[in-house]
Image (tube, rainbow, N blue to C red):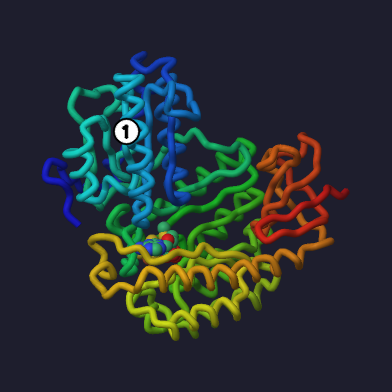
């Protein structure tokens, strides 16, 4: 994928990567202004937005929940599926209206994965002149500079897909109980449907000592849980040949932080050492997200997934044998090019065998520049019908998985108010959402909860001694 002509493609070494924070510069330019930040997509984007929030708040800005009244709007975009484009452009229309009618000085920024696509950057430049700042996934650290040096024309910085490894990044974290910790950036797998290797670049692992230092600081600051983040966490270390993911997990567990999680693991990189470490360390949570994508060998091959149905099932059974109480969730795509009824039935067969705790299910969405977009596409109606059939089975097993918890006492890390605000909410070690009747002083604590009621996607419970 090429980059827009006017954008200089830079390739920099990890040592060059340095953040510019306002702490070092000092400026009152945006003091007391308001910002609105909207995040689309995966946990990576959510965590990137925590960095963007830090930068904006270092200017003295405060966050608000509406574009009306905002001085700066930042839309952190996702490119994984086509509907992400539709959502962004729909929202952008609202921002344009606000700028034209109420606030001519509104600064509109677009960032994240979408600007990494040439067609999107070009479109923003040509057709959306009211957008002020555009930056890619490798340029967040330049936001300070872009805001300070905002000029009348669009300020666009989207660097090459090579990217950097940043250290000493500062975040305005959404929670003071649990934290995301990047362990690697990008992905080398190039599954034929996926745009991530093009938007986030090839895999770059952070050095383990930096990761451990970050986890230790979080623990010392009262954090109870960390989630190690990457597109392919268990390929961690392969590019620096320093340490494996299993060894990293062990070291993170050694910090003594109460809960360690990780997303996402690729079945191909899932080693016996990982299973050994996860099952032997009490503070590594027994929850594994193990994307299947398809249960058909033919489709898995076309997807470039590097495992067969049999190999996936063998791995699944190995994990369950070592950790029978663990919960396992997955991602599945239906309607991938070439998927016939028989292939879809293979997917259903894996779901019937694995009885997942839950799953993210998607209709295949062609992404420009990826090999699968050029393959013969499946009829949309057929794909929609398969998604519906798949979801029925997924929902059935999600409910069955939750029913096993009824009347059991489980540890729950209480995070705050429940959605409806009447109860508190938190997660079990197996990542089950529990609404709990409990006093506010339990927020931030791991408490024993008796499960009194189960639903498909959540449970209710009460505190026991
Ligand atoms: N790295 C993870 C893995 O390999 O399993 C997943 C990362 S991706 C951001 C999250 C999920 O989006 C994928 O597991 C896949 O199910 C889905 N996905 C990615 N590209 C897609 C596409 N073109 N159409 C539909 N779903 C897609
Ligand atoms: Fe995309 Fe495949 Fe990489 Fe996951 S492993 S991010 S699906 S290319």
Measuring from the top left, give residue 153's x and y in whole percent.
18, 27
Measuring from the top left, give residue 188's x and y in whole percent.
32, 63
Q: Name the one closer to the observer, 174 or 233.
A: 174
* Residue 366 falls left or right of residue 221: left
- Asked if one can make out residue 320 in the rendered structure from this viewpoint, the answer is yes
Give the vertical position of 333 relative to 253 (above or below): below
- Asked if one can make out residue 235 in the rendered structure from this viewpoint, the answer is no
Q: Secondary structure at mark 1?
A: strand
At 57% across and 40% down in the image, what residue appears? 218
Give the vertical position of 422 relative to 244 (above or below): above
> Picture quarter containing residue 186?
bottom left
Q: Name the one closer to the observer, 325 or 151.
A: 151
At 49% across and 26% down in the image, what residue appears? 64
Measuring from the top left, give residue 8's x and y in whole percent.
15, 42
Q: Residues within 10 Å of mark 1 (few under 14, many from 20)?
A: many
* Residue 436 falls left or right of residue 194: right
Give the vertical position of 303 relative to 48 (above or below): below
Looking at the image, which residue sits at the far right? 465
Q: Name the one closer to the observer, 413 or 112.
A: 112
The residue singled out by tag 1 in the image is 109
At 47% across and 50% down in the image, what residue appears? 43
Figure quadrant, ligand 1 = bottom left
Looking at the image, which residue sits at the far left? 5
Total tally of numbered discs in the picture? 1
């Amino acid at each position: 994928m090429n980059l827009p002509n006017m954008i200089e493609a830079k390739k920099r070494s990890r040592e060059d990567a340095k953040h510019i924070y306002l702490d070092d510069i000092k400026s009152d330019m945006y003091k007391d202004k308001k910002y609105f930040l909207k995040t689309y997509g995966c946990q990576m984007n959510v965590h990137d937005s925590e960095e963007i929030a830090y930068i904006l708040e270092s200017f003295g800005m405060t966050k608000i929940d509406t574009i009306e009244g905002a001085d700066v709007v930042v839309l952190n975009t996702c490119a994984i599926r086509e509907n992400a484009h539709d959502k962004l452009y729909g929202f952008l229309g609202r921002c344009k209206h606000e700028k034209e009618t109420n606030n001519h000085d509104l600064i509109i920024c677009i960032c994240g994965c979408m600007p990494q696509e040439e067609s999107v950057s070009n479109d923003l430049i040509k057709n959306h002149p009211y957008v002020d700042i555009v930056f890619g996934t490798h340029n967040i650290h330049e936001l300070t500079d872009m805001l300070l040096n905002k000029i009348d024309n669009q300020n666009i910085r989207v660097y090459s897909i090579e990217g950097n490894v940043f250290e000493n990044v500062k975040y305005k974290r959404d929670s003071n109980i649990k934290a995301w910790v990047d362990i690697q950036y990008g992905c080398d797998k190039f599954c034929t449907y996926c745009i991530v290797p093009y938007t986030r670049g090839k895999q770059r692992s952070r050095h383990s000592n930096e990761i451990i230092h970050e986890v230790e600081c979080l623990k010392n600051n009262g954090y109870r849980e960390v989630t190690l983040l990457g597109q392919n966490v268990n390929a961690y270390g392969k590019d620096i040949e320093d340490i494996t993911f299993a060894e990293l997990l062990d070291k993170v567990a050694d910090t003594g932080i109460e809960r360690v999680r990780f997303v996402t693991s690729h079945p191909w990189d899932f080693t016996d050492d990982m299973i050994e470490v996860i099952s032997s360390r009490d503070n590594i949570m027994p929850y594994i997200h193990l994307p299947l994508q398809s249960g058909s060998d033919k489709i898995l091959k076309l997807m470039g997934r590097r495992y067969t149905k049999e190999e996936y099932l063998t791995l699944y059974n190995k994990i369950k044998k070592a950790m029978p109480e663990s919960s396992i969730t997955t991602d599945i795509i239906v309607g991938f090019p070439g998927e016939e009824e028989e292939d879809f039935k293979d997917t259903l067969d894996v779901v019937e065998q694995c009885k997942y705790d839950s799953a993210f299910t998607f209709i295949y969405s062609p992404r420009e520049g990826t090999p699968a977009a050029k393959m013969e596409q499946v009829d949309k109606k057929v794909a929609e019908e398969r998604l519906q059939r798949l979801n029925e089975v997924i929902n059935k097993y999600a409910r069955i998985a939750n029913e096993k918890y009824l009347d059991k006492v489980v540890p729950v890390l209480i995070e705050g108010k429940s959605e409806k605000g009447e109860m508190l909410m938190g997660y079990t070690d197996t990542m089950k959402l529990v609404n709990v009747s409990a006093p506010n002083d339990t927020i931030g604590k791991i408490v024993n909860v008796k499960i009194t009621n189960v639903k498909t996607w959540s449970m209710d419970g009460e505190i026991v001694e």
